[in-house]
Amino acid sequence: MEKNFVRDVLQQAPFGYAYHKVILDHEGKPKDYVFLDVNPAFEKMTGLKGDEIIGKGVVDVIPGIRDGGFDWVAFYGMVAMDGKGRDITQYLEALDRWYKVSAFSLEKGYFTVVFQEVTEEMQRIEKLESQKKQIEKLAEEKENLLKIRQAMFREHAAIMLIIEPSTGKIIEANPSACSFYGYEREELINMKIQDINMLSDEEVKMRRTMALEKKQKYFIFTHRLKSGETRIVEVYSCPITYNGAKVLYSIIFDVTRREKYKKRLYEEKELLKTTLFSIGDGVITTDEHGSIKLINKTAQQITGYDEKEVKGRCFSDVFKFADEISGDEIEDPVTEALKGTKEAKIEGTAVIRVKAGALKPISKSIATIKAEDGQLMGAVMAFRDVSKEKEQQEKIIYLSYHDSLTGIYNRRFMEENIKRLDTACQLPLSIIMGDLNGLKLTNDVFGHDAGDRLLIEAVDVIKKSCRCEDIIARWGGDEFLILLPQTNSETAEGIVQNIRRVCSEKGDGNQKLSIALGTDTKTDAIEDFKQVMRKAEELMYQTKLIEGKGYRENIIEALMATLFEKSCEMDEHGDRLQNTCICIGRSLNLTSKALGELRLLAKLHDIGKVAIDENILNKPGPLTNREWGEIKKHPEVGFRIAQNISEISPVAEYILCHHERWDGRGYPRGLKGEEIPLLSRILSVVDAFDAMTNDRAYREKMETKEALAEIKRNSGTQFDPEIVEKFMNANCMNE
């Protein structure tokens, strides 16, 4: 009955109970223990069911029981083997619970355990201990913080002041403040902040109020030091509680250098901004994403976009670029530069589409903007409108391959094209060489303007006579070259005939346009085209030689006809002079050759007047100095004409000198006496007599007797005395 009573008590007890048998290993050491009995409180406190664990070892029931920080098997083994009871409060990791345990043994090898679960109690204790530690740590941190703050105030390099907000009195100053301002601490704490602030007392008070009310924390002031020097300072001021009262805690930084640098930076920025907005180049800047940040006036003028239209927009959305040749849209260079991983710089020309839609050529330079650490900040594009330059460049290129006077290709172009066309696929390849007759004479007589007109007229003839695929070039001063790809000799000869026919239909008065022509054809790829050109050139010169005499005679006739048209008296005047000059020449026993030249001189001595204005030649009144100057040019013009025509070149020098005087006061060279050629001296006397005895536009004729007296009076001054004597004695004026 007693046994049952004890069992009933254990079954109803509020504490856990268990009875175990220890299992020993071969060395006699505990390795496990078996559950023999447990009460309901045990089941509740452990979560283990008695009917499931009775007869089983604890190692099987609670795996890992020996792996934690406490060895339960060893602990209970000692109780069972030495019979000594033991108490312990221990955490069981396998069940995640705390237990307060009493273990004892009534029989060796067996032990009884009575325990209470104290998990919640232990957690409360742990929490209290944790809170205690936190409180101790906070107290320590607060103490340390106080010490740090005190150390910071006393030892920090920053300037610190504690100020009474209503009066501005300095309550406390750290050593850095004393060092900066140059005052001792006792001096500073007996001063007010307005004593060192350069602002007025009212302004300083207003700012203290703003800081106290937390309306503003940061201020820039100018403070005066004890030495009288002023420094720019940045002040961070905020209210704190000090000895139970609200005060201003101010941290002060000397920013004099920074503010001066900031001012310089601002000035440089303004200078740069002014420069960007005043330079002749367009400038556009973007951020790292390509958004437009700045566009100067020049860029606005070039593109047609206003700053308000584009600022903040993506560069690639606003500005479109096109290929210079095809006009197709291409990626804009700014976006291209921003994509680069390294610092990019893109230079060159491009074509940009302006607001109006037109494409405009520009010269550009694009560079990325990077920070000191290499971080991309954006890009800048400087550019200028090169439309005029491009037009000029195209004009230069055109002129480099074209003759500026006639507009046809020049020698440089033709030389390059000969290389290009001298191929088998262009055979037969024909060439025509042409030489414009009379260009030098035209230039010498009528001036280079007339020569230019003659060249232009010749080109017009050649163009009209050639096909559109023929290549025409001015090869030299008066030479032309025509290249005829895939053209046989018959076709080339037909074009030559066309040119000759059109030339014969052209001309000014009695003078016909004349071009000496030669042609040859390359038919075999192995032929040297230079030889073909040489052959065409030889044929051209042969033609020029054959046609030359007739052409020169035609020129003389045309010039004389022109002169007679300008002055109708010239024809009869020439005939009269010939007769009289020959009479004097015979009296001087001149050779037949000299007489022939004298006859030619008499006829052509005034040929230079062909270049003089008809109104001057036939002017009824006195000539002006300018007009007289024009008249005096005719010997030189006549000289140049004669020099250019081989048939009359022997009398060129006589024509030049026929207005020289015996006393050296004549023109154009001022020759004197026998320096003047004999034939010119003869003509001078005869010409003067004929002029006096025949009507002129500006005066009536003299009587013969009167004219002879004038000739005699000027003997030895204007005229050669010997010639005058022969003229008088030979009675040649009647010839």
Image (cartoon, helix red, strand yellow):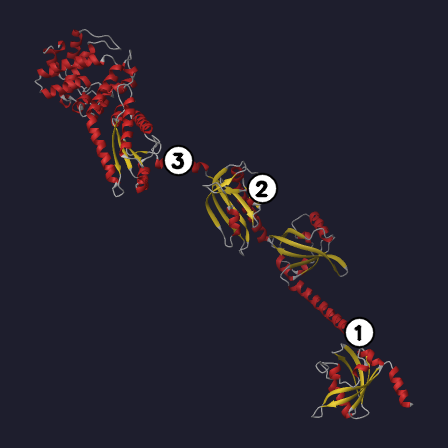
Q: Nearer the viewer, residue 475 or 501?
A: 501
Q: Residue at x 15, y 12 (%)?
A: 712
Rounded to the nearest angstrom, the CA distance separating label 1 from label 2 is 70 Å
Q: Mark 2 — residue?
A: 310
Residue 409 on image: x %, y %: 33, 34
Q: Mark 3 — residue?
A: 395
Instruction: Name the element at disc 1.
Output: helix
Q: How many marks?
A: 3
Q: Could you tell which of marks 1 and 2 lies nearer the N-terminus?
A: 1
Q: Is residue 521 left or right of residue 99?
A: left
Badge nearest the viewer, 3 or 2: 3
Rounded to the nearest angstrom, the CA distance separating label 1 from label 3 is 100 Å
Q: Is residue 302 above or below residue 76?
A: above
Q: Is residue 400 above or below residue 97?
A: above
Q: Nearer the viewer, residue 568 or 113?
A: 113
Q: Mark 1 — residue?
A: 124
Determine the image quadrant of residue 39: bottom right
Q: Which mark is residue 290?
A: none
In the image, what residue type sits under mark 1?
Arg
Dot 3 and dot 2 residues touching (CB under 8 Å): no
In the image, what residue type sits under mark 2?
Val
Q: Is residue 358 above or below residue 695?
A: below
Instruction: Name the element at disc 2.
Output: helix
Dot 1 and dot 2 residues touching (CB under 8 Å): no
Q: Residues within 10 Å of mark 3 (few under 14, many from 20)?
A: few
Q: Is residue 548 left or right of residue 40?
A: left
Q: Residues within 10 Å of mark 1 (few under 14, many from 20)?
A: few
Q: Nearer the viewer, residue 272 or 432?
A: 432
